[in-house]
Amino acid sequence: MSILYKSTRGVDGVTVTASQAILQGLAKDGGLFVPTELPKLDVTLDELKDMSYQETAYAVMKQFLTDFTEEELKACIANAYDAKFDTEEIAPLVKTDKAYYLELFHGATIAFKDMALSILPHLMTTAAKKNNAKNEIVILTATSGDTGKAALAGFADVPGTKIIVFYPKNGVSPIQEKQMVTQKGDNTFVVGIHGNFDDAQSGVKAIFADKALAEEMDKAGFQFSSANSINIGRLVPQVVYYVYAYAKLYANGEIEKDEKINVVVPTGNFGNILAAYYAKQMGMPIDKLICASNDNKVLYDFFKTGCYDKNREFILTTSPSMDILISSNLERLVYKIAGNDAVKDVALMKSLNTDGSYEISEEMKAELADFYGNYASEAETAEEIAKVYGDTGYVLDTHTAVASAVYGKYVAETGDAKKAVIASTASPYKFTRSVMNAIDAEKYNAMGDFELVDELSVISGVAVPNAIEEIRNAEVRHNTVCDANEMQMIVKQFLGI
Ligand SMILES: *Cc1c(COP(=O)(O)O)cnc(C)c1O
C-alpha cells in the first residue's frame, strides 16, 4: 500500500510522496504534511520481540515511507543507528519502582533529537536523489537547544547541504550553547538571536513562507528544508522507539502480550508525543498518552479546556527544550480530530496567528480522550530529581524529571496502575547545573560547569559521555548574534545572495 502526504492546510487536496514531503519540510501553504492515512504495522508482537533496533526501524518506517525502496531505507537506517550510539540497544530501558525510563539519549549529542536527526540527513539526501533535485539543500532550523546540535551533528559536511541554526541567545543551558558554538563543518552556521524559541521558530517559518525569497534562492541554486519536527522525516523515526520499547518489555517478560501500557512524554513542540500517538494508531497496545509540560503549560490548559492560548508570559525554566508556547506539531493532531478537515484547520490556525488563541469544538474535544495533560513546576521538577536520586541513585535530567513528576500526579489522581514508559529525553550531563543544584544546591552552587560534570560522574557512577568530553576544550567557531527581525538578512549573507 502506498502512503501519500497532504498539508494540514491543503484545501485543494494535493498530495505528495513521502520523499517529496521530506525534501520540502513545510508545505507551501504553511501547513504540516500528514499521511493521508495512518498505516498499521504488518508484523506481529512475536516477530517484533526478537528484532534489533534497526530491524524494528525498518518494520515501522517502511509503512510510512512507501516510495523509498527496501535497499534505500535499509541503507539510511544502517548509516544512522551505528557506532554513533554508545550502546547496541540504541534506546535502552531502565527499570525503577516507578516506571520504565526509555533512555533516548545515547546518540552523538546526548538528547533524544539524535534518534531522528541521525537518520534525517540520509533520508533527505536519498529523497533529493529520487526527485532529481538540482539545488543545494539549505536546512533552516530553530532550536530550543537540543535540535540545533543534533541537526548540526547530522548534517555537518554532508555533501549537497548547508545548515543554519538559530537559537535563543539567553534561553539554552551553558552546555547546550557550548555544544552548538563549537560545531565543526564548513557547511554549518550557528546564530544566537535576541528573543525566545517562539521568536526563532516564527522567524524560520516566515522565511519558509517568503515566495520572493524562494525564487531568489532557486536562481542561486538553493532550496530550503527543515530539520525541525515539522518535517515528517523527523516524526516517522520517532515512532520506532515506542514500538521497540513495547516489544522489549514483552520480550523481557515485563508485560503480557497485548497488555496495555501508558506512555509519558516531556513535551515542547508536541513532536515526540505525537510519534507515540502514531505508534498507538499503528496498533501498539498503548492506553494513555501523558503529556507533561513545565511552567509553560499551554498544552495542559488546552487538554483541560479545549482552548489553546499562547497569550501569556514566556517563562525560562530549567527544562529549556520545553520552553515553547507554540507547539507546532499540535496542528497535526488538531487536523486529525477535526476529521482531517483542512478548512477547519486553516480557520483555527488563522485565529492562532491573529489572536494568539483558538478553541476547538466539543466534538473535537471528545477525540482527545487518549491524552492526559499536566505540568510540573520548577520546585516539583527539582524535588523529583532529588527524590529519584535519593531513592534509587538514578539521575534524571530536568526534562525527564518533569515527565516523571507529572506521571506521579497522574497516578495519584487516577489510581491507574498500568505499567508506564517514561520518555527520557536527555542525559543529565546536558543540564548539569540544574540537575546538581536540585540534588544539593549548597554544595554545588559555586562549582564551574565542567567541575559539575566530573562531580555528576562521581555521584551517578555514569562515565562522562563523549559528547561532553569533546567540548571541554573545544574552540568557539560561531559567534554571530542578531535580532529576530534580522534572520532573513543573516541567511542571505551566509549564502552569499
Ligand atoms: C526537544 C525536547 C523535548 C520536547 O520534545 P518535543 O518533540 O518538542 O515535544 C523534551 N526534552 C528534551 C530534552 C528535548 O530536547
Image (spheres, grey):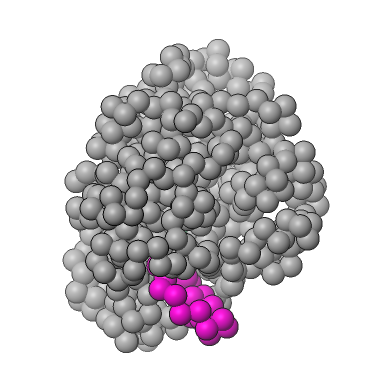
Residue 243 appearing in the image: yes
The quarter of the picture where residue 111 lies is: bottom left
Tell me where the magenta segment starts and ends, as one range.
401-421
Residue 224 percent location from the top left of the image: 52, 28
Residue 192 percent location from the top left of the image: 50, 47
Per the picture, the main secondary structure of the magenta-coloured stretch is: helix
Residue 230 percent location from the top left of the image: 54, 42
Q: Residue at x 33, y 32 (%)?
A: 73
The residue lying toward the viewer, choosing from 389 and 468, is: 389
Q: Residue at x 69, y 69 (%)?
A: 304
Q: Residue at x 56, y 25 (%)?
A: 16
The residue lying toward the viewer, choosing from 452 and 145, is: 145
The quarter of the picture where residue 134 lies is: top left
Looking at the image, residue 252 sits to the left or right of residue 494; the answer is left
Residue 400 percent location from the top left of the image: 42, 68
Looking at the image, residue 462 sits to the left or right of residue 302; the answer is left
Q: Quadrant of the C terminus?
A: top right
